[in-house]
Amino acid sequence: MNGNGLISSIRRRLNTEEQLRINNPSPFEYLHRHMDDVLGDGGILKEVVQPGQGPPVPQNASVLMHYSGFLEYSDRPFETTTNLKHPRMMKLGRDVTLAGLEMGLLTMQKGEFSRFLLQPQYAYGELGCPPFIPAAAVVLYEVQILDFLDSGQVDDFMALSLEEQNTVPLSTLLEVVHTLRSFGNRCFKQSRYDNAKDRYKQALMLLGNREAQSSAEKERIKTALLPVYLNLSLTELRLDSPHKALKYGNKALEIDSANTKALFRCGQAYLELHEYESAQSCLITAQAKKPFDSDINNLLRRVAILYKDSLDKQKDVYTKMFRDWRSPIKM
């Protein structure tokens, strides 16, 4: 066979192999055909499986998400959060370490579920991450955004001096406080009560540091303080600190004396402190505002039973004391 014949044979074989590859693409090659190029260099490809709503994830945000990373030809992820009931908040630029994944997240909306195909330069590089990620590996990430918070705004605000914070518009401060409360609420739902308390205390500190410029601004600050006090009161109850829970409940009542949540929290705190008469007083006042609230009514019945038992025990003690006092002393 001459040289030209060999070359022709090799070309035919290569063309056949190329045709087979086109007709029988690998899993990642098949996905590639249905994905959009995020940056324009082919390094980060995206497929939206389920669209989200609202604005995209901002820079330096903290993201609550489920994600799974896959190698080609592997049905089992090399990392995943889908087995977690409560995935933790991950801060972009700190907790999310893959450049391609972070860039992909910035294109996503709340509720969105997407797939990202990342080339090595946007994933684990030419060296990989032995023993789980081989060298120069292309990886697939499936990501669902559950929620995100603009923690970058919080970071920027907390970096300001006290004087600078007081020059920032009140609306900005209230946005920061809202974000901190949202963080706290997330932690609370995950039973991370100490972390929740820290977030609420941060919000309380920022509001307390604000120097109101007018009576209207003072009222807006008081309005923002009320839910923070309520959050702290409930959190202290979960932390078995009824005295602190009562303190924050009373702070809330100073702002709104008819607030049923604050009355209920105080009732709970008094119950834990075995101050049944005070607990009953708070709950009766709350019941007058919301007569059909099952939580208030159930707790009020419980307090009434415990209060009666406490009075009966006191009566028994006093009866015994009086009987012993009346009994003649035997010589």
Image (cartoon, rainbow, N blue to C red):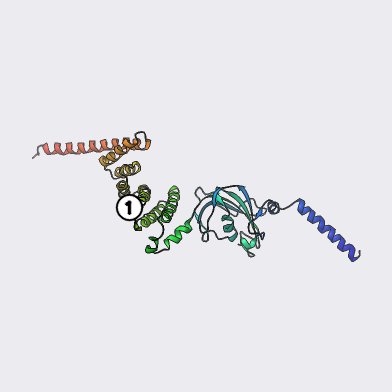
Q: Residue at x 47, y 57 (%)?
A: 151
At label 1, which amino acid type do we have?
A: Ser
Q: Is residue 236 visible?
A: no
Q: To which residue does mark 1 refer?
A: 215
Within-10-Å neighbours for mark 1: few <14, some 14–19, many 20+: few
Asked if residue 251 can be seen in this view, the reply is: yes
Q: Residue at x 37, y 63 (%)?
A: 163
Instruction: Say whether residue 310 is left or right of residue 107.
Output: left
Position of residue 273 relative to residue 154, above or below, is above
Describe residue 172's horizontal placement relative to residue 19 as left or right: left
Count how many numbered circles sit on residues in the image: 1
Q: Among all residues in the image, which is located at the extreme top?
A: 292
Quadrant into which the N terminus falls: bottom right
Q: Quadrant of the C terminus?
A: top left
Q: Position of residue 258 (x, y in %)?
A: 31, 41
Q: Is residue 275 left or right of residue 138?
A: left
- On the image, the x and y values in percent for residue 277 come to 25, 40
- The residue furthest right is 1
Q: Secondary structure at mark 1?
A: helix
User: Residue 262: image x %, image y %?
Assistant: 33, 44
**As drawn, is 175 to the left or to the right of 113?**
left
Residue 122's spot in the image, x, y percent?
62, 61
